[in-house]
Amino acid sequence: MMELTEFFVQLWIARWAVLKGLGITAFISLLAIVLGTLLGIGVGLVLTYGGRVSRLVARIFVDYVRGTPVFVLVLASFYLLSEVGVHLTAFQAGLFALTIFCSTHVGENARGALMSLPRGQMEAGKAIGLTFPEIFIYVLAPQALRQALPTWVNTATEIVKASTLLSVIGVAELLLTAKEIIARNFLTLEFYLFAGLLFFLINFAIERGGRYVERRVALPN
Amino acid sequence: MAELVLQIENLHKKFKDVEVLKGVDMSLATGDVVSIIGSSGSGKTTLLRCVNMLEEFHEGRILIDGEEIGYSGPQHKARKESEIARQRAMTGMVFQQFNLFPHMTVQRNVTLGLTKVKKLPVEEANSMADKWLARVGLQDRRDHYPGQLSGGQQQRVAIARAVAMNPKVMLFDEVTSALDPELVNEVLSVIKDLATEGMTMLLVTHEMKFAFEVSDRVVFMNQGRIEEEGPPEELFRKPKSQRLAEFLKSSKF
């Protein structure tokens, strides 16, 4: 039976630690999503419009990373990179792993969205004299973004969840913070449930936000 | 003799190993309205797409207002993308599937090329769009999105979008084929209206009656070549070749 009073007392004691853990989870997730999205758009462009060689390289990168457990990516970023002389802090290594992971998902998503546009859109852009970059910016990208948005929101929530894996290499994000608190007060069930609730709230907010944007940019018909 | 706006000389085009255009020659003077007819696979749409550089071609030349488009010199050297883009704006293309930009209002569909390619100020582009939308009878729809319009209305917007760029030649690629029968006439009457205004036009069409009424000349294509061409009265009433006679019979003209 949960001792609610005891839990709230302990939570109050640990409030700054919890907030800090939550902050680190939010910060590293946000950074990984932003950087991963930027990189992923580049990957998607290469996958869609690149030459044979660059497309092949991007394809191998995407398939390899997507075929690897995120956990392995996290461990590899932390332990393997230092073997080859790249010394990253746990935070940096974690950010690197999440960014790479995010970029492959965004890249594949971007490719799918761009390929799904009818060929006539490109041709109509050409026919009025637009150059390829102009066609991309004004014609293709706005349509592809609408297409890609729901999947992208999903990827963002995956990143937030995957950020818990960084606890293993010692990034003091929300899960590791919860573990540390539990080690002091032994309220195992309560604090894991509480951490789970916070993760749920973050992702719930992301999904609501995504829905809102989807509605805002939806085309009337 | 009026000035030649469009000259096509000995045009050859291959898809892989299949030669779909086997040496086509054609020329249009200012104000000419020429319809291309022929069965599917005869190369008529491909010919039209070559004029707008949506297809590459391997031999021959296309000149618009005396300027060789897409390629240059006897070596048939491909031009730069930016140059090709500029040259494409010399022709206006209307597609079978309309290809309006679904995420832009009707007005923005028309002004995109005006502001980005012609670099017109927004107000000027807007008033030009209004003028052309009024011409196709859709001024009151300028703030609608393509998805809110009927096929016939969409195609009229597509025509306005192309004509507003003030092209030397308008190209129409089976523009009524995707429309419900009751919507065909509103589009054809817009095209007729442009033709009587003196717009130079090259049309690929299956509407034989329309081709007969609107064209100065009709070209019958068969297996990548021009089989027969002439004024519509002659071509439709007194076909010389067996193939054309058969084609006309099967298309119930």
Image (tube, coloured by chain):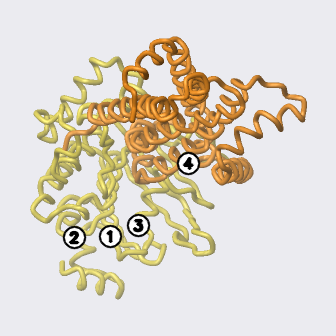
Splitting the image into 4 quarters, where does residue B166 fall? Answer: top left
Q: Residue B208 carries which label?
A: 2
Q: Judge left or right: residue A167 versus residue A219.
A: right
Disc 2 or disc 4, which is closer to the eye? 4
| Chain-order first, disc 3 or disc 2 | 3
Query: Regarding mark 3 in the picture, which secondary structure is present there?
Result: helix
Task: Name which residue type carries label 3.
Answer: Lys
| Chain-order first, disc 2 or disc 1 | 1
Q: Which residue was labeled with disc 1?
A: B37
Which chain corresponds to the colour orange?
A: A
**Spot occupied by residue B63 in the image (x, y as percentages of width and height):** 51, 48
Q: Judge left or right: residue A163 versus residue B127.
A: right
Q: Which residue was labeled with disc 3?
A: B44
Query: Regarding mark 1 in the picture, which secondary structure is present there?
Result: strand
**Spot occupied by residue B247 in the image (x, y as percentages of width and height):** 30, 82
Are the residues under badges 3 and 2 in a single subunit? yes
Q: Do the residues labelled 3 and 2 touch (CB within 8 Å)?
A: no
The residues bearing labels 3 and 2 have C-alpha atoms spaced at a distance of 15 Å
Disc 4 or disc 3, which is closer to the eye? 4
Q: Which residue was labeled with disc 4?
A: A108
The residues bearing labels 2 and 1 have C-alpha atoms spaced at a distance of 8 Å
The residues bearing labels 2 and 4 have C-alpha atoms spaced at a distance of 47 Å
The residues bearing labels 4 and 3 have C-alpha atoms spaced at a distance of 38 Å
**Spot occupied by residue A147 in the image (x, y as percentages of width and height):** 39, 44
Are the residues under badges 4 and 1 in a single subunit? no
Are the residues under badges 4 and 3 in a single subunit? no
Relative vertical location of residue B73 with respect to residue B245 in this rendering, above or below: above
| Chain-order first, disc 3 or disc 1 | 1
Label 1: few (<14), some (14–19) or many (≥20) C-alpha neighbours in 10 Å: many
